[in-house]
Image: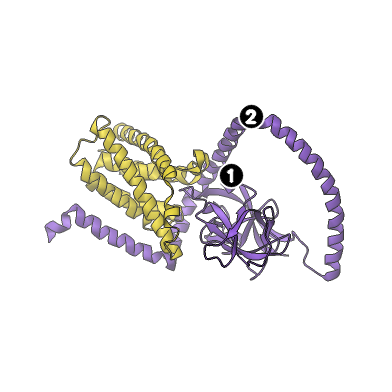
Chain colours: A purple, B yellow
């Protein structure tokens, strides 16, 4: 027996069983205190290296795009002219909207209590599943809080919180599901992440209308997310594999892998 | 004591690189796994009995730092160390001849094992095996990652060898 115990295979087998037992302890939060301690040690270094890496990534993107700059410049100039005109019209509509909301006693938009946070690391296997930020329970962050960029583009929600850092589950994470609708027709459904690569707008009724180019926003159903946070635009529509619903592929407006600053919505004022 | 400090520092640097650098600067957003390659290099240089506790320790710290299920990477690294020891006993593991082919095989098997076990843990979390092969990745991604990992392995191998020589670590 002693000779058997000294063999490599026995050691590996015994340790593998022990490690599998550790895996089963994870859902009970057994390792959370250790994760906080380890995270606190790594955090300052991750912050520095992440911001340097973003700089390198932006620099290499710039060098790669020099050839396209002229044609892009012309396209952007024309787009700018069109947007100026649209902006004037929208300002007018905004005034009317504010007056109407005031009369109907609706909550004002964009009135969130936000906490700014810096991204310090991301999914090490580049699977687009999560980001880590340098804010945690010490800053009033709790599980489930939505995370946005540029005022109202939703990128995910808080999944794990420790004292000084938190993990954001991105919308492309397979575990992410959010109640959404299109802003054009109020067509309702559920936005699900797919293997860190895409967002699928699922469970759309066959009788509802959804078209390429429609904007997808949070519907606010269930109360877990404020209404009106932008998710992306519809790229493709097809029937689901079971034939019961429509499904749409949603393209996010930005690449989360290059984000440096995000905002956690603590509360709606 | 010197060996413990040096190995811990190397592990620390590898984890910081893996979580905060490689996912950003990797081409095509397919990151290699520098921690896995460091463990592979360590097991080639030190052998099973000298390194398997380091592999388990590294796996647990990596899991805690990277929000992975604790135990997953420790299991992957343990299996990698065992696999390497199984072959390195029978063949000469150097950067020439059969050794080079062995290194490429080690990198390929370690990469596939890592992806397979991580996809399995995701499938377990989601309580479905429907997306297992999508999580595992298609052949283009896997081949690209193996190439990237081969480069990382050679880098880690030479760095570890030089560090051991410089600090006179056995």
Image location of residue A76, percent across then percent down: 74, 37
Q: Is residue A156 visible?
A: yes
For the residues marked 1 and 2, what is the alpha-carbon distance in whole angstroms?
A: 19 Å
A127 sits to left or right of B147: right
Image location of residue B89, percent across then percent down: 18, 42
Image location of residue A211, percent across then percent down: 68, 56
Which residue carries the number 2 mark?
Answer: A66
Quarter assignment of residue A27: bottom left
Quarter assignment of residue A17: bottom left
The quadrant the C terminus of chain B occupies is: top left
Q: Element at badge 2?
A: helix
Of all chains, the one bearing label 2 is A
A249 sits to left or right of A36: right
Q: Is residue B2 visible?
A: no
Q: Element at badge 1?
A: helix
Residue at left offset 73%, top offset 65%: A269
Which residue carries the number 1 mark?
Answer: A258
- Mark drawn on residue A174: none
């Amino acid at each position: 027996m002693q000779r058997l115990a000294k063999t490599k295979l026995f050691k590996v087998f015994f340790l593998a069983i022990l490690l599998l037992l550790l895996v089963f302890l994870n859902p009970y939060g057994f390792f959370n205190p250790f994760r906080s301690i380890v995270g606190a040690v790594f955090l300052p270094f991750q912050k520095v290296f992440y911001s340097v890496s973003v700089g390198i990534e932006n620099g290499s993107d710039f060098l790669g795009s020099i050839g396209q700059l002229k044609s892009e410049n012309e396209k952007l100039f024309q787009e700018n002219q069109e947007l100026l005109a649209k902006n004037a019209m929208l300002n007018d509509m905004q005034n009317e909207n504010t007056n109407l909301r005031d009369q109907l006693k609706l909550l004002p938009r964009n009135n969130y209590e936000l906490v700014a946070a810096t991204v310090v690391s991301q999914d090490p296997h580049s699977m687009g599943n999560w980001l880590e930020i340098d804010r945690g329970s010490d800053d009033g962050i709790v599980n489930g809080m939505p995370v946005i960029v540029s005022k109202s583009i939703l990128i995910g929600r808080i999944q794990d919180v420790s004292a000084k850092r938190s993990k954001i589950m991105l919308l492309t994470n397979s575990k992410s599901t959010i109640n959404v609708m299109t802003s054009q027709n109020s067509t309702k459904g559920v936005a699900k992440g797919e293997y860190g690569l895409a967002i699928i707008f699922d469970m759309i009724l066959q009788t509802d209308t959804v078209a390429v180019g429609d904007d997808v926003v949070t519907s606010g159903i269930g109360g877990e997310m404020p209404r009106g946070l932008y998710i992306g635009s519809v790229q493709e529509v097809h029937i689901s594999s079971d034939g019961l619903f429509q499904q749409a592929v949603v393209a996010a407006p930005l690449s989360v892998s290059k984000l440096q600053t995000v905002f956690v919505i603590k509360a709606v004022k | 004591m010197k060996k413990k400090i040096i190995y811990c520092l190397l592990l620390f640097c590898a984890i910081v690189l893996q979580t905060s650098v490689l996912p950003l600067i990797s081409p095509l957003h397919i990151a290699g796994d520098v921690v896995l390659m460091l463990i592979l290099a360590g097991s080639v240089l030190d052998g099973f009995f000298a390194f398997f506790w380091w592999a388990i320790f590294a796996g647990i710290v990596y899991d805690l730092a990277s929000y992975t299920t604790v135990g997953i990477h420790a299991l992957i690294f343990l299996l990698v160390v065992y696999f390497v020891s199984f072959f390195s006993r029978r063949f000469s593991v150097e950067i020439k001849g059969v050794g080079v082919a062995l290194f490429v095989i080690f990198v390929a098997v370690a990469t596939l094992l890592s992806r397979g076990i991580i996809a399995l843990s995701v499938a377990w979390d989601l309580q479905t095996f429907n997306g297992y092969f999508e999580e595992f990745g298609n052949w283009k991604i896997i081949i690209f990652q193996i190439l990237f990992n081969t480069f990382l392995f050679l880098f880690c191998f030479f760095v570890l060898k030089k560090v051991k020589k410089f600090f006179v670590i056995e």
